[in-house]
């Protein structure tokens, strides 16, 4: 039949074609069915990944053919779709091992893939995500082999292509809650607003006596339960109770024992959602929920027929505590954990039916012993380590890390203290790392990050005097004319500095200085770089620059490296002033012209030329050539001087071109040295971040106890090259741009 489909062949249907066609129909009519795996044979896994989904096919060799055992596939979440290919392949294998854990535990697994996943998972310097996956896969007997012929790979590809395309929408539900308590009773009002105009109103009346804060927490818990029933995954909660909002946000300490129980109830309920935020709003913005709460507290029979009505007999935390007490008195076998199989073997010699699993359990149980009904592990640091369930492990971790005897140690120290105290559970190292990473005080008071977060970006100027950097230096001791400040402007290419003392640094004075010293002397520049001082961000100054066609670029907050040339000019002037003035500090304004002249006649390391020569084409005559006559001074010829100056002007362009090459080479050397220290930190829109607390933004009342980081904030826009726009969690934008060197990831 293949020959008949070729263009050059003549169509002729014979018995051979009829037999081939019949065999093709029989094959299509009898697709492969899933078979029960043979425990004595290894399982083979084929993986397929795409931009939106991951799939895998589990097969076994039987009589020379590969027979399918099971198929697994799922859509990728929005963050997962941005993973690298090697991470998607690893995620596909981890997802398959989780869903088919019983197969992976009872068989030897061979993974066929051309992706070098085995080498990557074996590296010691993996990222946290890949390290966690590598540890999770290490418990199975997995071998990696090249894919080779297609064979069963087509099944994985087919499942991957068959998977529907996902469309993930960021759907947020808005929840308004309010609670009230008065002499007539207590109640709560809940308003839940969802997509497509969905609005639910709920009125809750409490049959128990509640305080105002307790009523506010009850309203919040009831609202979240309503949102959970509606299938919401992302909820924005708004309440007019500042105590509740700040306690949940971690800004207020929860001292009352009853409020602490409500706080933990909220944290437990929060895990049922993908993301929950609680913000405080003024009471006038929460009037509808407030009315529902007041009507619920004073309602009479027959009222409020248009809303969902409910009466609560007992507080939420009491019902949960009763449930926890009942759970404590239940038989431990009703809630099995990692200790169950080991206890069963040590007490009753009960083994799993699978031979391999039984052998593994027998080997594992040899390191454990039961004393007075409690399971202990024989340890190295401590003879006997008490084995804990997940709830007990969470308690001891919190107590050791942030309790009375805790000192917010790192993950490794926390694990060491737990082992020395005599506790053990299989995932204690991973759990401690996750707990320390999410600890709010540890994040807020963590060390500042000094490694650069982005590679340096060098922007060469288009022509001489095309790009200027400006800055304000001061205050200085009062000089002649009541001058206390210095405005400095420097050309990025020639390094020519203009500076003028000022008595005040208003935006009007800045505009006059730029016009007098830069624009009228060297022409209209293309770009002006400044920092975020109010004098440079003034509306009238920006209108003046825009009217001349000058692009005004403002650096990121607290990131002076963006305007590094202006900062270097400040340093040169300030250093030389200190060396010249001695005790006469008020004479700095008189010494400024001499410093500028000396700088302009000094060769710069980046261009190997003096700023004067790059501007005028010739070297300036300096005072030392007058005191001790130089060759050109002693053999000065007035007749040829003008011709020589004209020749120098003709050759000035070549001098500038050579300086451009030298400067670019110097920048590349610095770039290589700078980029070797980079520790990349990138953020996406919507990520939560901490922001370094600058000295100007620290609360002076806190002194040395002020935190190094404040937040969290949300990334609003990524402006590339390490610049970001931030916003508060309420959605209000934060002015100015912020560099990634002052940001770090917020873990929650």
Image (tube, rainbow, N blue to C red):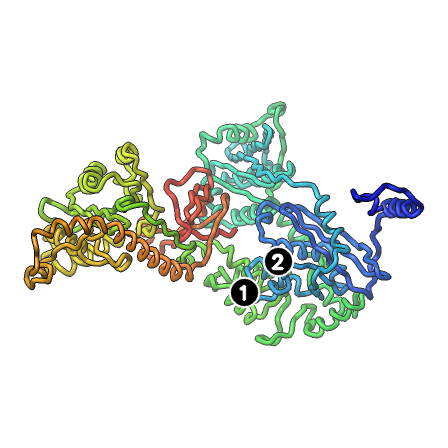
Secondary structure type for disc 2: helix
How many angstroms separate mark 1 from mark 2 (CA)? 31 Å
Which of 547 and 628 lies nearest the eye of the viewer?
628
- Position of 271 relative to 202 (above/below): below
Place of residue 300 in the rendered image (x, y in percent of width and height, measured from the top left) = 59, 25
| Residue 463 visible in the snapshot | yes
The residue that mark 1 highlights is 125
Residue at 33% over, 57% down: 704
Occupied quadrant, residue 347: bottom right
The residue that mark 2 highlights is 391
Q: Residues within 10 Å of mark 1 (few under 14, many from 20)?
A: few
Which of 142 and 10 lies nearest the eye of the viewer?
10
Place of residue 676 in the rendered image (x, y in percent of width and height, measured from the top left) = 42, 62
Occupied quadrant, residue 503: top left
Place of residue 105 in the rendered image (x, y in percent of width and height, measured from the top left) = 74, 63
Question: Which label was assigned to residue 648?
Answer: none
């Amino acid at each position: 039949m293949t020959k008949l489909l070729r263009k050059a062949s003549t169509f002729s249907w014979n018995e051979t074609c009829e037999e081939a066609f019949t065999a093709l129909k029989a094959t299509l009519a009898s697709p492969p069915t899933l078979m029960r795996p043979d425990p004595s044979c290894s399982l083979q896994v084929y993986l397929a990944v795409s931009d939106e989904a991951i799939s895998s096919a589990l097969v076994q060799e039987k009589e020379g053919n590969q027979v399918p055992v099971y198929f697994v596939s799922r859509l990728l979440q929005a963050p997962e779709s941005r993973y690298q290919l090697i991470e998607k392949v690893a995620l596909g294998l981890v997802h398959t091992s989780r869903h088919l854990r019983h197969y992976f535990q009872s068989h030897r697994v061979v993974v066929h893939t051309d992706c070098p996943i085995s080498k990557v998972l074996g590296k010691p310097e993996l990222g946290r995500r890949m390290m966690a996956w590598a540890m999770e896969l290490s418990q199975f007997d997995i071998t990696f082999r090249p894919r080779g012929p297609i064979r069963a790979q087509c099944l994985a590809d087919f499942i991957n292509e068959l998977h529907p395309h996902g469309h993930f929408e960021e759907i947020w539900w808005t929840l308004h809650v309010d609670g009230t308590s008065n002499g007539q009773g207590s109640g709560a009002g809940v308003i839940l607003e969802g997509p497509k105009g969905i609005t639910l109103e709920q009125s809750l009346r409490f049959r128990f006596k509640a305080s105002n804060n307790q009523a506010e927490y009850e309203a919040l818990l009831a609202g979240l339960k309503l949102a959970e029933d509606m299938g919401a995954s992302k909820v924005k909660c708004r309440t007019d109770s500042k105590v509740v909002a700040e306690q949940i946000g971690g800004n207020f300490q929860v001292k009352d024992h009853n409020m602490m129980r409500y706080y933990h109830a909220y944290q437990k309920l929060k895990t049922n959602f993908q993301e929950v935020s609680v913000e405080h709003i003024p009471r006038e913005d929460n009037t509808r929920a407030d009315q529902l709460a007041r009507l619920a507290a004073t309602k009479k029979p027959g009222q409020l027929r248009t809303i969902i009505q409910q009466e609560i007999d007992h507080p939420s935390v009491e019902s949960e505590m009763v449930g926890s007490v009942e759970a404590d008195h239940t038989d431990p076998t009703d809630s099995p954990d990692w200790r169950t199989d080991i206890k069963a073997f040590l007490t009753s010699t009960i083994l799993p039916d699978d031979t391999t699993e039984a052998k593994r359990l027998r080997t594992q149980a040899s390191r454990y012993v039961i004393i007075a009904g409690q399971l202990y592990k024989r340890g190295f640091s401590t003879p006997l380590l008490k084995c804990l369930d997940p709830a007990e492990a969470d308690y001891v971790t919190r107590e050791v890390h942030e309790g009375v005897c805790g000192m917010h140690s790192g993950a490794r120290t926390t694990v060491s203290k737990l082992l020395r105290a005599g506790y053990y559970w299989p995932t204690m190292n991973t759990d401690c790392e996750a707990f320390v990473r999410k600890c709010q005080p540890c994040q807020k008071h963590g060390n500042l990050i000094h490694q650069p977060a982005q590679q340096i970006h060098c922007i060469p100027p288009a022509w001489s005097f095309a790009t200027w950097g400006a800055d304000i230096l001061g205050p200085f001791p009062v000089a002649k004319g009541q001058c206390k400040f210095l405005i400095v402007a420097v050309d990025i290419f020639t390094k020519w500095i203009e500076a003028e003392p000022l008595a005040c640094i208003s935006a009007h004075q800045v505009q006059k200085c730029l016009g007098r010293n830069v624009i009228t002397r060297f022409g209209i520049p293309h770009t002006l770089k400044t920092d975020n001082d109010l004098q440079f961000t003034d509306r009238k100054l920006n209108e003046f620059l825009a009217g001349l066609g000058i692009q005004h670029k403002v650096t990121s907050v607290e990131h002076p490296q963006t305007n590094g040339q202006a900062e270097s000019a400040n340093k040169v002037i300030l250093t030389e002033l200190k060396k010249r003035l001695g005790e006469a500090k008020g004479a700095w304004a008189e010494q400024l012209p001499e410093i500028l002249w000396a700088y302009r006649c000094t060769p710069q390391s980046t261009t190997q030329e003096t700023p004067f020569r790059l501007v005028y084409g010739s070297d300036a005559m300096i005072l030392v050539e007058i005191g001790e006559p130089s060759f050109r001074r002693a053999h000065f010829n007035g007749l040829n001087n003008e011709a020589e100056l004209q020749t120098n002007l003709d050759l000035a362009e070549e001098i500038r071109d050579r300086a451009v090459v030298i400067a670019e080479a110097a920048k590349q050397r610095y770039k290589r040295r700078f980029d070797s220290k980079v520790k990349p930190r990138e953020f996406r829109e919507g990520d939560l971040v901490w922001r370094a607390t600058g000295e100007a933004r620290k609360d002076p009342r806190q002194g040395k106890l002020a935190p190094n980081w404040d937040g969290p904030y949300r990334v609003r826009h990524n402006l590339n090259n390490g610049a970001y726009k931030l916003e508060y969690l309420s959605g209000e934008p934060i002015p100015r741009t912020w560099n990634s060197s002052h940001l770090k990831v917020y873990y929650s």
